[in-house]
Amino acid sequence: MGYAAARGGLNAILTAENLVRRLRDFDPSDRIELDQFTGRLRLLVDRVMGESGLWAPELAAMALRQGEGDIIEAVHLLRAYKSTLGRLDTAIPVHANDMQLVRRVVPAFREPGGPQILGRSTDYTARMLRTTDHDIIDNGASTSAIEGVLKTRPSNSRMSDVLRDMDLLVDRRRTDDPEPFDITRTPAKPPAPRSALLSSMARAETGALVNQWYRNILGPDGYLHEVTLGEVRHGKLPINVRHPMTGGSVNIGSFRATEVEAIEDLNGSEEDRTRFDVGYGFCFGHNERKAIAMANLDIACYRDGAKSGLEQSLLMTTDGLDSAGFLEHLKLPHYVTFRSMVERKVAVRRVADGSK
Amino acid sequence: MPDTHLEASQLSARFLDLHQSQIVFRLLLDALSQPGRIFHLPAQLVARVPVVEVPLLALLGYDTPFSLVAADHSREQLIARATSGRIVESSEAAYLAVCDSRNELLPMGFSLGTPMRPDTAAQVSVQVNGIFSAATASTATLHVSGPGVESTNHVMCDGATQGELEFLLRRDWAAPRGLDMWIIGVDGSFIGIPRTSRVTAGPSWNKGVS
Amino acid sequence: MTLDTASHTSPTTIAQLVGHRTTETFALLDEESKREIRRALLQAVCIPGYQVPFGSREMPVARGWGSGGLQVTLACVGVDDAVKVIDQGDDEGVNAVNLRRLVTMSTGIDETTEVDEATLIQSRHRIPEDDMNENHILILQVPVPEPLRGIERDIRELARMHAEADYSRMWVSLYEDKVRNGVITQSTGYPCLVASRYIVATTPIPRWDIPRLHQSKFLTLFGAGREKRVYAIPPYTDVEPLTFEDVPFEVESADGATCRLCGSSESFLVETPGKQESWSCSDTAWCRRRRNA
């Protein structure tokens, strides 16, 4: 009976758990401290927070350590932990312009208004693997210069506003203020409001979004073209809540996010071909490829107008836990279903033989 | 000062702890899955809050839209404070407690759901002036059949009038749309009638007589 | 903390601001989550067979591994319950053990392998052979809650088909199956019409178990955690497997095989392949009791 031996199920589980713990926690190397994750593997921590939908760098570090570096495992630990926590309040909305920038690039213009900050990015570094112990490079940048670069700056201009002033942007701004769709409380299915699509993508698995984008560019059933990016930003935003007694706004913390605006060239027969449109991407932490894919897919979904299955693909197939969990459930025992399938094959064969 | 004190004790009485809300939920679930079978709300809760409010106090969560019909607005606010539910117009409520079983909105004036989303129909707790029991005679009787019932459940409600029950059970909908009801007697005895039930209010049915 | 004292001072801590939410956890989930699942279940029992969407929470078991069934169990469970959990009919299946200990460890309730001692029975892919009644709630784990998935992919069209009870394409596909293969080849999770209204996915339970759902004495709840839906079949409700008047519904045949342990031919048997075929009951607790009787 394989691993479902009579009375042995609990023993099998305990043995497996002990094995995981021993090999993970008693490896000959030094135990990894949490600040080594947040300090030296920051992009990994940011990615896990983004895919969990939970801003908690230390908890993400714990989850990565417990999950031995498996991102899906870490995300599962964080989201399951979140399920045990009560929800206290909803933050007051902040404007994206309140972001204190550490990085901003604007591919669409050479001299956009407001700062262009290359910031901390490997985009233009040479990808040469450093195989010696001397991987700590001091290329002479002084501490004050570094601090200057890392200092956050407010943004005072964004590309969509510039384009709007130039009357080059289709105006899709709403005048009402609907409540955002909460995907953690209500499952989103097409047709869904844009807030459902954006929050699903904000929490989606990075690879899933990148693949959805690329597949729609080059795949056999895709039809997207690439956007021009208007904004790629990374910085800090405040978390403000309403004081229960005074009603005033109280700052209780901050978080980092990546924000992207994608400028789309409208060329459809029923579109305004004298203007552009904008897609929006946003996620926790520093994760540019995810936010760029998201912005492109946001405008693509709008332009698609429910003609294809793109909205369904984005809403329902990009969550890391859903996809990995369902895939790996195939490892569970399926001998009852298999037995039933064998029985049907025999039945079909009998009919076929009988009719010869 | 005295008002605050009164309100505070009324408020604190309406907080159900997690075990009480689970017990009440199971009773409400059983009542709707076995329509017409008589159940009893926990005596401790019956002694402490108006019985018609108990389902809402057990089920409402943050922002769940609800309405208390035919009662003081201050009672509605107490329920909101105790559960974090959101007070809305009765036509938009997911849960309602109706204190007067003769209220003209019953049963058709509340949300009956839509063909795409029948689960947006309202579930309603209604107070009647009687006691549900397996007595041999009573002032009012219901005959319930449909999903959850093996053949027919005959339910006696002593103290309620036949007219009161008939009024309550006028129904003009096509399932899966419709209203689900918990009909609660003054002593906390109650029955569940989901929208799929077929109900007639018959003349008093004497158990001893065939 | 609970506010059962009469005093009502100004809140000075976040816990007090939050009000009645207690810091005590019972059954893994916080109170809000449990209430949300319960509200969905109450709708489900009033609309037999309709898939009620709910805010499915992430659980310590992965999506696709019973997170939905677990949430239903956790929303229902109370201190006086006793839980039985099986997978493929086996209480000792590794995943069943894991799910069962999650329930018992977070509630302190009794666990059992015997149906007549249980009040909540969570199961993957089987209905226990023993009779159940109104004292039981059967909670089935659902991998794919959509019975029409094989004939339609578009979510919007699926919603319309259920809303309008437009199941014609399902019937056509069964007919084509029968014509092409000589039999209807649906193996487990046979589509059934519930209360003459909604077609449901009966989860991958074998056809053997389907008749147990029809006019049952017990309530059956279905939890699909990954797809975020619950549905229900109340007791004494019609559950009709879809078939044609001249094509009787067929349960699995074992060609007269019997269980090598207890000798039964009246239970669902699974085979151990090999030079000599060997069959045994999938329901291990039922088989063991029969042997010890």
Image: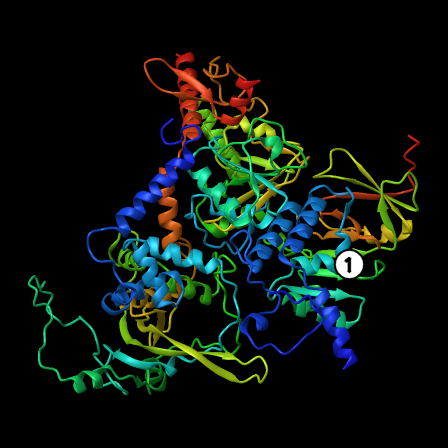
Q: Residue at x 50, y 29 (%)?
A: C206
Chain letter for mark 1, please. B
- The answer to which of C126 and B12 lies nearer the viewer is B12
Residue C245 makes an appearance in the image? yes
Q: Residue at x 34, y 62 (%)?
A: A60
Task: State the image quarter where residue C133 is shown.
Answer: top right
- The answer to which of C108 and A84 lies nearer the viewer is C108
Q: Is residue B118 left or right of residue C56?
A: right
The residue pinned by badge 1 equals B52
- The answer to which of B11 and B35 lies nearer the viewer is B11
Q: Residue at x 65, y 65 (%)?
A: B83
Q: Quadrant of the C terminus of chain A?
A: top left
Q: Position of residue C62 (x, y in %)?
A: 41, 48
Q: Residue at x 30, y 52 (%)?
A: A221
Q: Quadrant of the N terminus of chain A?
A: top left
Q: Is residue C101 left or right of residue C47?
A: left
Q: Residues within 10 Å of mark 1 (few under 14, many from 20)?
A: many
- The answer to which of B37 and A32 lies nearer the viewer is A32
Q: How is the image coloured?
A: rainbow
Residue A300 lies, with reference to residue C114, above or below; the image says below
Residue type (three-letter) at the residue carrying disc 1? Val
Q: Position of residue A141 (x, y in %)?
A: 12, 82
Q: How many numbered circles are shown?
A: 1
Q: Is residue A250 left or right of residue B119?
A: left
Q: Position of residue C100 (x, y in %)?
A: 49, 41
Q: Position of residue C44 (x, y in %)?
A: 62, 47
Helix, strand or loop for disc 1: helix
Residue A269 makes an appearance in the image? no
Residue C187 lies, with reference to residue B10, above or below; the image says above
